[in-house]
Amino acid sequence: MKLSIKNLSKTYSNGVVALDNISLEIPMGMFGLLGPNGAGKSTLMRTLATLQEPDSGTAHLGDIDIINNKHGLRKELGYLPQEFGVYPNVSAYDLLNHLAILKGVSNKSQRKELISALLERVNLYDQRKKSVSNFSGGMRQRFGIAQALIGNPKLVIVDEPTAGLDPGERNRFYNLLSEIGEEVVVILSTHIVEDVRELCNSMAIINHGKLLFDGKPSEAIDALNGKIWSKKTTKQELGFLYEEVNIISKKLVAGEPLVHAFSHENPGFDFVRIEPNLEDVFFSHILGASLEQLEKQLAA
């Protein structure tokens, strides 16, 4: 079972190009979809979840035509959106019971067994009588995974699942997603590079609706070997370095800027070559796409 996406495009009425001829082959397992906010990730996820129509292109999960057979896809889909509402004062057990009925689990004893198993799997069985609206962010996300797994889906989509979670809840969520990814196609849409580094064997990077990279994280990192340089600098020197060197990222370490640069040769200014990581892959692709877009605008 694999997910095949070919030439998907979507432009909104305000002229924003959310998807620009996206083609991907996604195998069983964990697949990371990386991109900054506004890159088109949620549009792609909503399209695959049959919540909106593309302007053109096709998508198939095995033999299921996602665009033209929405009902068939929904039988095989588990979806955890970035934000999902819950009924107030309804317990985790009762809400899962309601959702299982909507998913077609009509036998009461089978439904009870299923719900108990799902709550155990996401480590919420002891909290089953508590209202989901009073759950912490991490508990609510784990409940979201439980509802997404009703019906043994073949495709699970999770959109920005760890945003706002503390480190402990994030690790618990990582472990849960890893277990799920052994059995089905799981698409993890995120702007958090750490999520993809921890979980995914394959990934894609999109920005402004365009596909910038598709492959294995290890291959992307290897392609940057010898081309990433680092320097701890001062806030006063930052402006000068941005003018002289191809800076791809900056972060504060002990209150001082640490910058990474992309260059085939030593850029000078006391930069030191370092081993690349997935953040360097992400920022180098995003920066490259931004520069290309700027050049096109200037040439127009």
Image: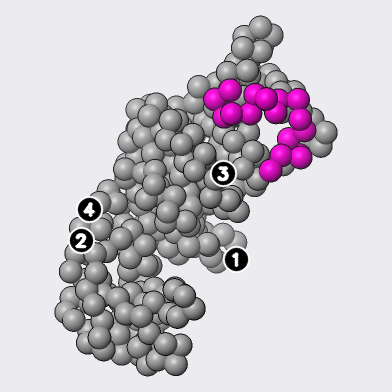
> Relative to 184, is 246 on the left or the right?
left
* Residue at 58% from the left image edge and 23% from the top image edge: 120
Mark 1 or mark 4, which is nearer to you? Answer: 4
Q: Which residue is mark 1?
A: 14
- Above/below status of 80 relative to 99: below
Mark 2 or mark 1, which is nearer to you? Answer: 2
Circle 1 — which element? Answer: loop
Q: Which residue is mark 2?
A: 223
* Residue at 52% from the left image edge and 30% from the top image edge: 77
* Residue at 25% from the left image edge and 86% from the top image edge: 270
Circle 4 — which element? Answer: helix
Q: Position of residue 248 (x, y in %)?
A: 36, 74
CA separation, marks 2 and 1? 37 Å
Taking the magenta stretch, the answer to whether it contains residue 121 is yes
CA separation, marks 2 and 3? 33 Å
CA separation, marks 3 and 1? 38 Å
Sequence-earlier tag: 4 or 3:
3
Q: Which residue is mark 3?
A: 169
- Asked if marks 2 and 1 touch (Cβ < 8 Å), the reply is no
Q: Which residue is mark 4?
A: 219
> How busy is the neighbourhood of tag 3: few (under 14 within 10 Å), some, or many (20 plus)?
some
Q: Position of residue 85 (x, y in %)?
A: 72, 41
Q: Amino acid at mark 4?
A: Glu
- Asked if marks 2 and 4 touch (Cβ < 8 Å), the reply is yes
Q: Which residues are magenta?
A: 120-136
Residue 57 marker: none
Circle 2 — which element? Answer: loop
> Relative to 42, is 194 on the left or the right?
left
- Asked if marks 4 and 3 touch (Cβ < 8 Å), the reply is no
CA separation, marks 1 and 4? 37 Å
Sequence-earlier tag: 1 or 4:
1
